Image (spheres, rainbow, N blue to C red):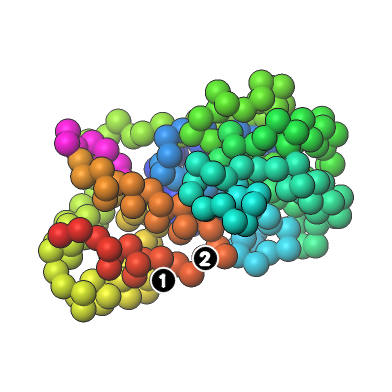
Amino acid sequence: MNWNTAGFEKNKKYFINAVENGNLSHAYLFSGPEGIGKKVFAYDVFRLINQREPENAPDFKLLTPRVEDDDLPAGRHGTKIYIEDIRKLKSYLSLKPYFGPYKFVVINDADRLVAEASNAMLKLLEEPSPFTIIILISSKPKFILPTVLSRCEKVQFLPSREKEVDKETAKAIDEFMKISKEGLCERMQYAEKLFAGKDYQNLIIGLIHTLRAIENPNHKVLKNLLRLNSLLSQPQFNHRLALENFLINLPQ
């Protein structure tokens, strides 16, 4: 299988062995810094196990925090995961898989579960069906209910200690740095090139790691890269439009 996630070879081997030995868990916690690639890795795990693409797959569901009141601004800090969301998950998981061996649920920013939703999630984890895999993703696992954590296999995603990057990635990062000094037309052409290459997610993750390694990074660019990476990890978003919007607003 071709993984879309760069690195994390230990975690890849862990899941490959689990599949081969038939000892998959019904629940996992993916923890690590924001933007490191946890969500992309979760998609890869679905591909590995169910042998299908997660986009529009009936056996794959992504749950993200939302604004309960539509009149409120949709900033990330105003979003939560509510008990209604977990009830819908329970109904979804009550059905058997359509194609693959498992129904998958990926819960992004699981630390944003409200108290009632956390208790409902706990019950869901206590009574798992044999064909269900739930992956909780969080950069702040200390805010997740301890009893929920205790029912999940822990998989950590840590920044690579390797200072060197491969030549292809280094070339792509250098090209990105140059395009930030170009005009709108060149940026739009670059967005089209990125989208056509299909490897844009790994490039964005590589850029995030590179900026984090710099002593005084451009925090505005880093923040926008993290937001872009979040959008690119969700199949319901238009990835090309997300790339174009990011590059249009990229400061020179």
Q: Which residues are magenta?
A: 208-216
Whole-percent x and y of residue 219?
25, 43
The correct choice, above or below, for 2 with respect to 37 in the image is below
Whole-percent x and y of residue 210?
24, 43
Tell me the residue at 46%/52% (across/down). Answer: 230
Q: Which mark is residue 12?
A: none
Is label 1 in contact with label 2 (beta carbons under 8 Å)?
yes
The correct choice, above or below, for 19 with respect to 229 in the image is above
Tell me the residue at 45%/67% (across/down). Answer: 239
Q: Name the residue carrying label 2.
A: 237
Whole-percent x and y of residue 151?
72, 26
* Of 89 and 203, the residue lying toward us: 89
Tell me the residue at 38%/48% (across/down). Answer: 226
Report helix, strand or loop for mark 2: loop
| Residue 215 part of the magenta-drawn span | yes
Please indicate, yes or no, whether residue 67 appears anywhere in the rendered image: yes
Going by the numbered disc 2, the residue's amino acid type is Phe
Tell me the residue at 65%/36% (across/down). Answer: 113
Q: Name the residue carrying label 1.
A: 241
Residue 162 figure quarter: top left
| Residue 231 part of the magenta-drawn span | no
Going by the numbered disc 1, the residue's amino acid type is Leu
